[in-house]
């Protein structure tokens, strides 16, 4: 899993590339925690996770997202999701993630 990100006005866009599973979970957690710290320093309140290049996600990925949601929410920061396609969009919808992290229109 590779994560690149950039600040755009009042939000950060993080592009995820690869698989979000038990083998990449720790890397994703640490990367999102780093982004959290930078957002706090810059006073940015929104993170957009771009899933367009995520090829696979399992239940471990759901756990990572829920844990990061709780951590970001604790600091008054929100997470939104965009470009989740196919089976990943279905997983996010069925798991209820979109109720916590709204889906942005493509």
Image (cartoon, grey):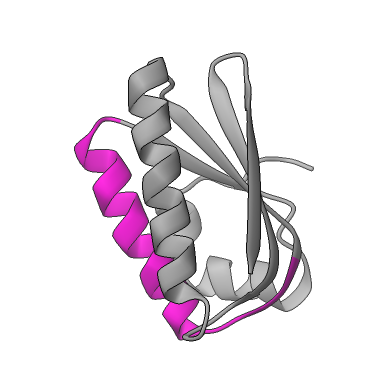
Please tell me which residue is depicted at 41% across the width and 72% down the height of the picture: 26
Residue placed most toward the observer, 85 or 44: 44
Please tell me which residue is depicted at 47% across the width and 30% down the height of the picture: 46
Specify whether 53 is left or right of 38.
Answer: right
Specify whether 38 is left or right of 80.
Answer: left
Q: Which residues are magenta?
A: 54-76
Dominant secondary structure, magenta: helix
In which quadrant of the rendered image does the C terminus lie? Answer: top right
User: In this picture, is 35 found above or below 45?
Assistant: below
User: In this picture, is 36 found above or below 49?
Assistant: above
In which quadrant of the rendered image does the N terminus lie? Answer: bottom right
Toward the left, the furthest residue is 74
Quarter of the figure with residue 54: bottom right
Specify whether 13 is left or right of 43.
Answer: right
Residue 28, image x, y percentages: 48, 63
Please tell me which residue is depicted at 35% across the width and 55% down the height of the picture: 68
């Amino acid at each position: 899993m590779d994560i690149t990100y950039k600040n755009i006005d009042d939000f950060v866009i993080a592009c995820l590339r690869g698989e979000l599973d038990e083998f990449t979970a720790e890397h994703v957690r640490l990367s999102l925690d780093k982004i959290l710290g930078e957002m706090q320093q810059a006073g940015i309140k929104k993170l957009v996770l771009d899933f367009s290049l995520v090829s696979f996600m399992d239940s471990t990925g759901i756990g990572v997202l829920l844990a990061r949601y709780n951590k970001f929410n604790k600091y008054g920061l929100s997470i939104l999701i965009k470009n989740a396609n196919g089976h990943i969009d279905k997983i996010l919808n069925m798991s209820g993630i979109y109720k916590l992290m709204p889906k942005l229109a493509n």
